[in-house]
Amino acid sequence: MLSVRNLTKQFRGHTAVQDFSAEVAAGEFIALLGPSGSGKTTVLRMVAGLLPPTSGAVYIGDRNVTTARPKDRQIGVVFQSYALFPHLTAGDNIAFSLKVRRWSKRDIAHRVDELLEITQLSQRKNYYPEQMSGGERQRVALARALAFNPPLLLLDEPLSALDAKVRVSLREMLKDVQQRLHVTAVMVTHDQEEALSLADRVIVMESGQIEQIGTPEEVYHSPQTPFVSTFVGVATPIPVRATGDGSSDVRWGDYAFPWMLTAAEQRELASGTTHIYVRPEAVRLLATPLTGQEPKGEVLFSMFLGNAVRVRVRMPDETVLTADIAGGKAMYQPGESVFVQLYDERL
């Protein structure tokens, strides 16, 4: 449905985006995820026609819209700042683009009421933006962007200005609306949880380039680069070495990880070192060792997270591991000694 081909954008010699290519299927929800300055918003603005690319092409369906004006692309856009008309009610804000397109009064009224119901704003139809909360205003902005049935919806960090509880609620509503209307959506975000919970696929970006494209499960459990490993979720790199005995094991100090390497990888690594990335759910803390292999560490601090306790543990080689203890009850004191067990299948 959307085809982005080798998009590049340069600003006075600085390359903001380099050879960005992606295919988005009809009805798919894509998240562009990355830190500030990674180029994700620049990509969105080039797709929307708000910024001309230095090179590359944008296709919507079979139309090359690379040089088309924004209004000729028929794209719905939702901005972080809502961008509502302050002198118009919620209903009139939604109806605005339909009046411009010369829809009949009857069709406009029907479409506005339909979208107000879908976005749970029927009781706010005659409210002005200043009379509504931030979450309600963003829902109006979403309904307005969807009013004329655009083939593509672009969302530029639409939830980042909202408080945590409203953000979670709107996240669920946004996914529901997108699936109900089967609209193709591309969203820019720096929020990992937002990207993983909403998107069918995630495009992780850094320094203007794509690091990985995959489902949320793929980018979380099978990251392809060190950047993805540490940016998507929490992960600690630990140095490991080949055992050198012809097995497929690698070792972290005296701790052995079975089946981590194929025989070919073992030979390639030989006696050198590499890194395994450890997520908090792969770490178990023990008061006493179970096998005698478990390395011993020192608790740096604990943080209560509600449904879990997050513990940071410094190991003898100065690696600092993060462990999440489900249940949110077990607290560890700074300086306390613990033994660490790692779940190989979660690494």
Image (cartoon, rainbow, N blue to C red):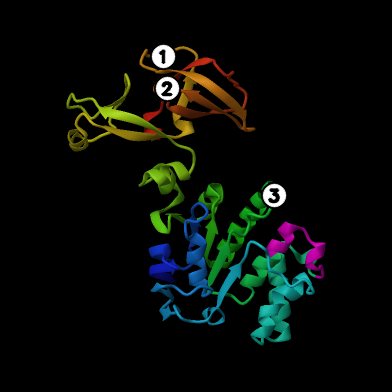
Q: Which comes before the other along the chain, label 2 or label 3?
A: 3
Query: Looking at the picture, how far across and down is residue 139, in whole percent?
Result: 69, 63
Compared across the picture, whether 163 is left or right of 317 comes to: right
Q: Amino acid at mark 2?
A: Gln
Q: Residue at x 52, y 69 (%)?
A: 45
Q: Residue at x 46, y 27 (%)?
A: 320
Compared across the picture, whether 241 is left or right of 110 comes to: left
Report the predominant secondary structure element of the magenta stretch. helix
Can you tell which of label 2 and label 3 is closer to the viewer?
A: 3
**Residue under label 1:** 290
| Range shown magenta | 126-139
Quadrant of the snapshot with the N terminus:
bottom left
Tell me the number on the disc at residue 112.
none
Q: Amino acid at mark 1?
A: Leu
Please determine whether, in this image, residue 144 is positioned above or below residue 132: below
Query: Looking at the picture, how far across and down is residue 51, in whole percent?
Result: 51, 73
Quadrant of the snapshot with the C terminus:
top left
Q: Secondary structure at mark 1?
A: loop
Q: Secondary structure at mark 2?
A: strand
Q: Is residue 234 magenta?
A: no
**Residue under label 3:** 163
Please determine whether, in this image, residue 155 is positioned above or below residue 251: below
Q: Are marks 1 and 2 in contact (CB under 8 Å)?
A: yes
Please determine whether, in this image, residue 189 is positioned above or below residue 329: below
Q: Are marks 2 and 3 in contact (CB under 8 Å)?
A: no
Residue at the extreme front: 12
Q: Is residue 347 visible?
A: no
* 140 and 205: which is toward the camera: 205
Query: Looking at the picture, how far across and down is residue 49, in whole percent?
Result: 51, 75
Q: Which comes before the other along the chain, label 1 or label 3?
A: 3
